[in-house]
Structure formats: structure tokens, C-alpha cells
Amino acid sequence: MPMQNDDRLEKITLLVGGHAYSDWKTYRIDSDFLKAADAWQLSLGIRDGAFNVDAVRGAPVKVKMGDDVVLSGRIDTITRDISRRGITLSLSGRDDGGILIDCAAPVFSARQLNLSEVISSVVRPLGITRIKIQADNMIRSDRIQIEPGERAWDAVMKAAGSRGLWPWFAPDGTLIIGGPDYDKPPVADLILNRNGDGNNLISLSETRSIQGCFSELTLLAQSHASGTKNQKLKTKPVDVSRSIPQAFTVSIESDDDTGTGDADDGQSGTNNMRIKIGDPSVPYYRPQIITAGDVDNQAQLQYRAKKAMADARLSGLDITAEVFGHRTDKGELWEPGQRVRIKSELHGIDGIFFLMGRSFNGGRPGGPVTQLRFKEDGVWIPDVYTQKAKKGKKKKKGKDQLRAVNLEK
């Protein structure tokens, strides 16, 4: 059964200008991996007729729930409303990712930078100082080119995507580049039984779609000339999804494989690089071809291709649930990245799913409610902890793995 939510644990506090403000009339606080910046909205009824001077646009804020920080960012918009019904102050904003969406990245070009160096060069001039790389096996980018007018968030996405990773902001304002850890145990059970026994859900919605899913995805790219030779990498089995019953299949080609181009000597680059990935869960032929432009090497090509297919498969399932309160039965705040077991007799669902996003909603008179948005477990960002996956393979080998690909023909 879910824990009885203590009002103190659910209390929303806004910290701004050295002051703390609570007793909000309504609030909504979002957090979603698939959204560039987490948004928040708060409204407050003012009794004394004076608007607070600390609430100015661009002011840095922290939003807390009980003693836990749920968001760090800035005020984007201030609305002061006066009517016969009273005086209301409404504030809205985003987390620290907002400035990366709004502003251009510093223009620069460089060679042989690792991922941490690339990200730091983009975000530190915009005030983002805390950065955490949360992944194994970082590769260096042979060439980095930030064009004039390129948004900082797009530059961060491109750098992270070269390793098959994703950027997001932690509640304390740290920029994290990485992905989920699918070895973590589920944090809660959500139950919807026909007879009502043990039910702890307000509502549950399941949507399955073939749109955006492909039986076969081909990624085309080329590698630029490089002062350091682009070594061909022998591909080893990589666990794309440890929970799904069917595997992706992969094959890789380049002009060297077909014998139609010049040898890759590290000075002339490689043309006509391609990788093809199949998803057996799609029941009929649905091909797609995408282009990646310049890549540094075959490893980068594989990371991008596997993430593209994982994103396509991810679009096939959406589960939305509503629960009372903002915490699990163990007292943890709901947050993206958690794994949750969902059991619904009416839907025929009984399995573990990945929490992609959540929204805290509340205020008088409705009380605190959380909307949870789930995706298929084990699919999104498959190549984060490759070392951990290798250890797992010693214990179990199954259909969930990509098979070895020989790049030398």
C-alpha cells in the first residue's frame, strides 16, 4: 500500500532572493528526459495587496518539496493579476537548461577533445559549471565545429549523441551526460486490479502505435580527413536491451568493404559509410534511411545508429498513470530514471517499465497528484554502461544482444 503522505513532505517551497515562499494556490512541476528543459508554474494569492519585490524575471530559484530539492533554475515569466476575485501572483520558469535552449553556443573549432572538454567549452560561458559524465568508454572527437548561431543545447545534444548519450539537468543544477542504469531495482509497484484489492492508481492509460517504428533503419555517413588514423574497430556483442524478448540485428558497410573507394589512410577520410539495424518486433517491412553527416569513426557511427533505432522503438509504447501524492510507498520522490512494476488486470499488463517523465500537480482543493509517463524498459540509451554489460554477458547470453560484426572483410 502507498505511504500516507505527510503534508510537510508534500509542501512546495520556492527559494528566491534569500527568502522562502510556501502556501501556493496551485503548482505544476515537470521533469522529463525527452524535454530539453524542465518547466515549473506556481501561483499565489496575495492578501496584503503588495507584490513581492524578489520575484523578478531571470532571478535564480530553487524549488523544494519538503526537504528535497526538485528543481534549480530561473524565473522566466511573471504575471500579476488583479480582479474582483483577488490578487494573484503567477510565476513560471525552467530549470538551468533554459539558457542553453535560448542562447547561441560559443563559436569555436577544435580537434581531439574528449566529451567532457567539448561540453565544458559550450556550457561554462553560459554559467553552467557543474557537469557530470555518467557513462563508460568515452571516445575522443577528432573534430569539433560549432557554427555561428548554433544553439547551445543543440551543440550539447550533438556532442552527447556522438557517444549515444543524452543530456539532462539534475535537481541540484548539475548537467549530466549519460543515460539510465537498467540494473537498478524497481522503486514501486503500481496496481490496478479488477476487484480493487491493493489498487493504488487513480488512472492508467496504455497507447501502442506503429508510427515512428521501423523494421529496418539505415544510417548513412562519411568520415572526414584526420591527422590521426581512424582505426577500424572490431565490434563486440553489445546488449541493446536486457529486458525485451527480441533483439536488434545489425550490419555495417563502408567503401572499403565494397571495394569501391580509396583506403582510409587517416588523411583522405572515408565515404559511403553505412550501418543497418533491424527491429524484429515490427511485424512487417517498414524501412527508413537517415543521414548523420560527418562521423569520426565506425564506433561513433554505431553509437548513433543504435540510439536512432532505440528512439524509434521507444515511440511504440506510452503508458500514463496518475497517483496520489508525490512520493513512492518508500518515501522517495518520483523522478525520471526510476524503474516501476505495473500490474493491471484490465490492460493485461504485468511488467517493469521505465519512468521517462513526471508532473507534480497540486494546490487547493485538489490536493497533490503526480502524473507518471512510462516507456518500454531497457530500450532508451542502450550504450551507457558497456563495461557492466560485458560482465553480465559472462553470466547470461541471450537473444537480447547485438551479434558480433566483423568489419574486416
Image (cartoon, rainbow, N blue to C red):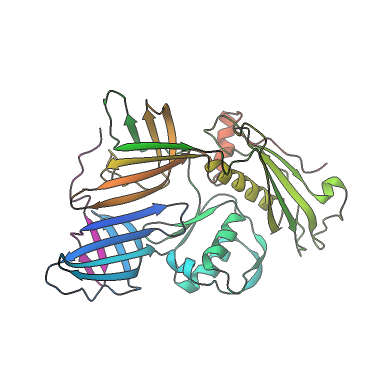
**Residue furthest front in the image:** 84
Residue in the foreground of this view, choosing between 265 and 250: 250
- Residue at the location (31% across, 26% down)? 193
Name the image quarter holding residue 292.
bottom right
Residue in the foreground of this view, choosing between 171 and 217: 217
Name the image quarter holding residue 383.
top right
Q: Main secondary structure of the magenta part?
A: loop
- Residue at the location (27% across, 28% down)? 198
- Residue at the location (54% across, 71% down)? 105
Q: Residue 362 at what x, y percent from top left?
A: 25, 51
Q: Residue 343 at what x, y percent from top left?
A: 37, 29
Q: Is residue 30 left or right of residue 14?
A: right
**Residue furthest left in the image:** 48
**Could you tell me which quadrant the C terminus lies in?**
top right
Q: Residue 82 at what x, y percent from top left?
A: 19, 71
The question of residue 62 being in magenta is answered with: no
- Residue at the location (65% across, 61% down)? 141
Name the image quarter holding residue 404.
top right
Count of labels in the image? 0
- The magenta span reads 1-24
Q: Is residue 226 left or right of residue 402?
A: right
The question of residue 16 being in magenta is answered with: yes
**Residue furthest bottom in the image:** 53
Q: Residue 211 at what x, y percent from top left?
A: 56, 42
